[in-house]
Every structure is written in C-alpha cells, then in structure tokens.
Image (spheres, grey):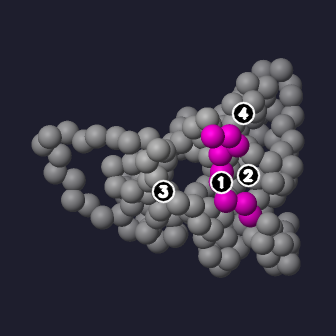
C-alpha cells in the first residue's frame, strides 16, 4: 500500500483561537483539556478506506442544526493526492448527517496555509425523521479518504496557497 500522508495536531494557539470563535462557552482550561485529548485520525481495520476523525468535544445536533467543528488536525499530503472528507457512514444513514459542502476537499498544499492547514468539518443534521444526533467526545463522526488525482496535459496552474478555507477563490 502506498503511503502518501501523515496527520498532525495544529498548534494549541491555533486550536484555541478556532474554538473561542465558535464556542465561547469553553474556558481556557476547557480548551487545554480538549486539545490534550485530541486523537489523530486512524483506520478502524486493515480493510478500511477511511480514516476516522474523532470529535474533539461532545456535541449535539437537533434536526436542522449545523455545527462547524475545529478538529485540531492537519494533514501533510503528497503532491497529486487529496483528502476527501465525508460523514461516518452510520451517522449519515441513521441521521442524514451531511457535510455542508457535500464533500470536504483537503488539497496537498493546504498543510502550509496561514491557518496551519487546520481541518474544519461543518455538518448539518438534515433528518426528516426528527432525530437528534449526539456525538460524545472521542467518537468518530467523519472519515477521510486519500485519493490520487490527475491533471490535464495543458495545465498551467502556478498559484501558491496563502490562506485557509476557501483561499483559492479569493
């Protein structure tokens, strides 16, 4: 099997800034405890294609609610590879938990972006059955799959990423 990437934690400062932005209820002590417990993504079995992303803290999503999770994770990815992120299959099947951008795309040059390549996962509970999703801290809630991709023979892309999420369209 070809090895094309490695996961790391972002710095504590980066993680703390991201959490404080969307979760002001967490104290500095809470954030340090959360950061210390962050698990790097991993596969559950040898046959698993996806690397499970684990919830850095517990969250609940009622029907129609959305949450943006700062995972505390970044990925160094070889050129010509991409990390695609999806909800865990069981959560999607049971609750219609969906990614807000359908599929998260983490490019190989995102690792060196201004935000350290911090991977955020934004999800919505799109249930039509009135079901609330409860995800305990440390539980797998999303999965990432590394995919090799090609480019056209006349490709001329020379730009260099300098920002975080959505930076290539700015």
Query: Which element type, helix, strand or loop, lies under badge 4?
Result: strand
- 74 is higher (above) or lower (below) than 96: below
Disc 1 and disc 4 in contact, CB within 8 angstroms: no
The residue closer to the viewer here, 85 or 159, is 85
Q: For the residues carrying marks 1 and 4, which lies nearer the camera in this image?
A: 1
Between discs 1 and 3, the one toward the N terminus = 3
Residue 54's disc number: 2
Dot 2: element: strand
Tell me the residue that label 4 is attached to: 97
Query: How crowded is the residue under tag 2: few (<14 C-alpha within 10 Å), some, or many (20+)?
Result: many
Mark 1 or 2 closer to N-term?
1
Q: Give left or right: position of 38 versus 143.
A: right
User: For the residues carrying marks 4 and 3, which lies nearer the camera in this image?
Assistant: 3
Are the residues at dot 1 and dot 2 in contact (C-beta closer than 8 Å)?
A: yes
Between discs 4 and 3, the one toward the N terminus = 3
Q: Tag 2 or tag 4, which sits nearer the N-term?
A: 2
- The answer to whether any part of residue 7 appears in the image is yes
Marks 2 and 3, how far apart in space?
Answer: 18 Å
Residue corresponding to mark 1: 41
> Magenta-highlighted stretch: main secondary structure?
loop
Q: Residues within 10 Å of mark 1 (few under 14, many from 20)?
A: many
Q: What stretch is highlighted in magenta?
A: 38-46
Which element is circle 1 on? Answer: loop
Q: Position of residue 117 (x, y in %)?
A: 51, 64
Q: How far apart are marks 1 and 3 (CA)?
A: 12 Å
- Using the numbered discs, state the Cα–Cα distance from disc 1 to disc 4 in whole angstroms: 19 Å
Q: Disc 2, disc 3: CB below 8 Å?
A: no
Residue occupied by mark 3: 5
């Amino acid at each position: 099997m070809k090895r094309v990437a490695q996961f790391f934690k972002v710095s504590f400062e980066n993680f703390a800034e991201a959490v404080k932005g969307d979760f002001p209820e967490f104290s500095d002590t809470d954030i340090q405890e959360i950061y210390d417990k962050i698990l790097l993504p991993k596969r559950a079995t040898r046959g698993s294609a996806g690397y499970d992303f684990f919830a850095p803290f517990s969250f609940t999503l009622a029907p129609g609610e959305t949450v943006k999770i700062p995972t505390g994770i970044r990925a160094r990815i070889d050129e010509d590879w991409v990390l695609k992120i999806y909800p865990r299959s069981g959560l999607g099947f049971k609750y219609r938990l969906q990614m807000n951008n359908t599929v998260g795309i983490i490019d190989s040059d995102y690792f060196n972006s201004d935000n350290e390549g911090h991977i955020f996962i934004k999800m919505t509970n799109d249930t039509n059955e009135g079901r609330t999703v409860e995800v305990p801290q440390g539980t797998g809630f999303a999965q990432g799959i590394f995919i090799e991709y090609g480019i056209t023979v006349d490709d001329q892309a020379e730009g260099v990423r300098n920002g975080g999420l959505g930076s290539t369209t700015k």
